[in-house]
Image (tube, grey):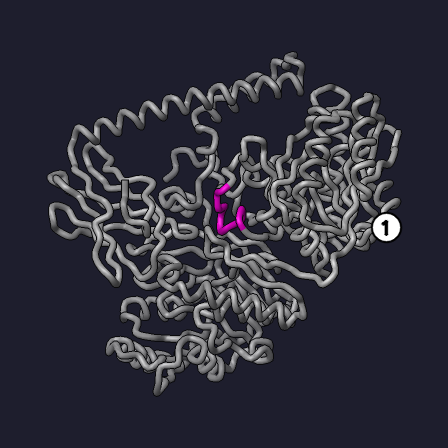
Amino acid sequence: MNKYKFIGLKEQAIYGIKNPQLSVVGTMRTEDYKFEVTVDSKEIEFEYIGLDGDDFVLRADLPKSAKEVKVYVITKEDKYCVVSIKNNWAGRIYRKIIKTIRKILIKIKVLFLILYRGMKFLWREHHFLVPPSMWKKYLKAFVQRFLADGYEMFYHPFRQSEYLKWIEESEVIEPYEKQKYEPLISILIPVYNIEEEYLSACIESILSQSYQNFEICLVDDHSTLGETKETLEKYAKKDTRIKVKYREENGHISKTTNDALQMATGEFVALIDNDDIITENALGEVVKVLNKDTSLDFIYSDEDKLDVKGRRCDPHFKPDFSPDTLLSLNYICHFSVLRKSIVEEVGGFTVGLEGAQDHDLFLKVSEKTNKIHHIAKILYHWRMVEGSTSMTISNKSYATDKGKIAIENALQRRNIKGHVEKDVLSTYYRVVYEYEKEPSVSIIIPTRDYADILDKCLLSLYEKTNYKNYEVIVVNNNSEKKETFALFEKYKKQYQNFKVLDANIEFNYSRINNLAVKKSKAECIVLLNNDTEIISEDWLQVMVGYAMQPHIGTVGPKLLYPDTTVQHAGVLLGLGGVASHAYIGSARKELGMFGKLRVPYDYSAVTAACLAITRKKYEEVGGLEEELMVAYNDIDFNIKLLKKGYYNVCVPQVELFHYESKSRGLDTTSEKYKRFLKESNYMFEKWGEEIMNDRFYNPNFTKKAWFLLDKKKENKNDKGKK
């Protein structure tokens, strides 16, 4: 076991029978470090990939003659050996056997899982009376799923080999055709002590653009590396569109970029780091978008990284503009193009926020305009070089502190009461909204019998809620059992803020909740299932704080199954049908991609199993749609709020247990299934465009599984072609 507290190792092994390869997976908890790998005391090259948060993967190809492999961490204080492994053929054979056995067991598990799901499907769809014409289709689907190992039907974006295959299969660079509107774009590049190799690659990627109406504004921040200045002088002579300024003293990135901004004469400015590159169509894609809407002020794209060997990895497929996500992290980052007049209006880059200067700028610009557009294409490659934030955030830990200040400044500018917390397990943030007086809240819980389930819900609510100004309205829908009414009387006597409202009508979730809201007088409404259990004591305080923000519609928490895996952490539209929850079955403490399971994110919808919203907004969209008696009423409700211009937010720091569908049962009967199909068809007819184009779920991701990439289907016409 590793004795050094600054590093946690999840895996350290040598794989491969013919070609041995070292694999180390872990978490680094220190700053300003670097790795060194040796084979029999001789240093060798290795591949290092910084993952989300402080996680990393280190790989190295080993010579067959290697006897002992060591991995060192070098810090300011000392050099530590954190991994020492003897390389032997027998050990690699053993690991190969174990891996093969695991693969067989996974195949068996997949087989039973597919059979189980297939039996349920055949019963639901055909009651096992499958038409002969359908057997071939179902058998082919079964074989494909089994051979694909479930998720292996897709590419995982953070497995480099799979991502590279996806690029080869799916990425298309469209040629630029002359447009009616072709504005001058000024590219701002602060420069400091960068090697010629990287700086030249950066500038050449701009000069080779398909769109050529640009200028490059390079400002050197008093570099001490000779080749940096030599490279700048060479390119200043090469093209008249290249402007170079040399600062007389080092002022850091904000001052340097502001100098570049002053040099710019374009209508728009683009932000590029001096060691990164843009795709040949980057500027052209921006201009295409501007020709569709000339009023746009801020355009950003997707991005990925270049590893130390120049290979692409770690893509960031982003959502459309998400203001609450931007308060959790700088998800926009690169490639960003902004209207110069607005950048100047907000004062450019803030001196003193170096490391978070872009995040600060994006927050300021988003306060001045809502004309923000996202291009769902990778137009920027962020280079992973030693000392770069792209390699690991710990290389620039000050950036996370400055990011916190940037968000606090944004709250102050917006006259919003609140403070910012840094998430302890990641590099991201959470805004905690504050209020002098607690808004009144009505917690509405529909129920029908199952007194034991309701009792668990109410007990956790009253024992754990640290909020004071709330009432509980239990809506009784045709309960019959004595223990249910005894439970009602118990809580009435025990708590003055407990009420029971009778709604003895045919079960209609929407109508039941709408009736309760009309009877309520509170400022804020919380819809809560009777099969939930409170975990977080500040659940109501946090959810109400977000719900009271003028731009936010619904607010939902992270819901957990009884085994503590994730049941809900936001809803993705169009996934497997109308909608699906994100991260179902994930571990409770998992970070999620870019912190989605740790910090607030904007989603198209959150589940009504636990949902907070102000009364005013609830009434503004007409409440829940009563034509949707059981399914999708919450999805319809969320989309109505989106259409009104509100944002729906998942706050995963709030956690509840959800014992899903216990009190009403699953939709397995023929009558219930027909109703489900009817309500599903209703949603597609009403919201087909919104369902198929979830603006908070990047279109590069598959619609069959969350946050994975589709494998290209074989085209029969392509067989035999090269």
**At 79% across and 26% down in the image, what residue appears?**
484
Q: Position of residue 434 (x, y in %)?
A: 66, 61
Q: Position of residue 511 (x, y in %)?
A: 84, 37
Q: Position of residue 687 (x, y in %)?
A: 73, 44
The reply to whether the magenta stretch includes residue 596 is yes
The reply to whether the magenta stretch includes residue 594 is yes
Residue 159 located left or right of residue 93: right
The residues colored magenta run 589-598
Q: Is residue 206 above or below residue 162?
A: below
**At 67% across and 35% down in the image, what residue appears?**
532
Badge 1 density bin: few <14, some 14–19, many ≥20, Cα 10 Å: few
Q: Is residue 409 above or below residue 668?
A: below
Which amino acid, mark 1? Lys
Q: Quadrant of the C terminus?
A: top left
Q: Nearer the viewer, residue 445 or 50?
A: 445
Q: Nearer the viewer, residue 383 or 637?
A: 637
Residue 122 located left or right of residue 115: right
**At 54% across and 67% down in the image, what residue appears?**
178
On the question of residue 713 being in view, the answer is yes
Q: What residue would you read off at disc 1? A: 521
On the question of residue 625 being in view, the answer is no
